[in-house]
Amino acid sequence: MELFGIPIVQVYLYTLIIAGIAAILYVFISDIAEGVGEVSPFLDPAVILSFITFAAAAGYIMELSTKWNSGYILTGALIIAFILALLLYFFILLPLASAEVSLAYSDESLVGQVGKVIIPVPVDGFGEIVIESVNGIISKRAAGYENVSIDYGKEVLIIEVKSGTFIVKEYEPFRFK
């Protein structure tokens, strides 16, 4: 079968190549077209380009590997592309859009966290603590709350931050009796 004087296999192949290149280019310019997907998730360029790419790939593979009528192949390719585009949207694109987690933190955001003393905190002096977070392990200068000394290896609760120094108190977890 031919379309515009070109064999249908070549139409699928050209469509696959063009849609693949467009998808790669979209990765680089996606910030410009960011608001388009807000109107409807199915107008999102990533979903449209993936649908076209999946349809062209499925059509090309089925044209080469089956003896079916081209109309059946086109229908099958569109169904396969619709299912794959839905799966891509619901299991990859949607979770990525709602996972806007930043690795940035501020000292004030660490108040209330539990850390561990790696350099003992003396009375009227400074020691060092480490805090494990999503950012990795953060090490900070610490002073004892109410000028109390804290030994190495103790867990501490961050009470407040003053001029970059974490004011900490030995952590006592609440236990039900």
Image (cartoon, grey):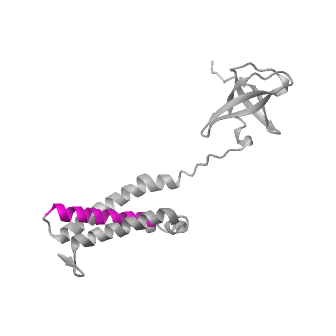
Q: Residue 6 vs residue 86: left or right?
A: left
From this view, report whether residue 83 is shown above or below residue 13: above
In which image quadrant can residue 12 be found?
A: bottom left
Quarter of the image containing the C terminus? Answer: top right
Q: Position of residue 171 (x, y in %)?
A: 71, 24
Q: Position of residue 46 (x, y in %)?
A: 44, 63
Given the current orientation, which residue lies at the most extreme left position?
67
Given the current orientation, which residue lies at the most extreme right position?
124
From this view, report whether residue 149 is shown above or below residue 21: above
State the residue at coordinates (70%, 21%): 154
Q: Position of residue 106 (x, y in %)?
A: 71, 44
Q: Where is residue 172 in the image (x, y as percent from the top left)?
A: 70, 22
Residue 117 vs residue 25, the one in the foreground: 25
State the residue at coordinates (50%, 63%): 28
Q: Residue 55 vs residue 131: left or right?
A: left
Magenta residues span: 45-66
- Check if residue 21 falls in the magenta segment: no
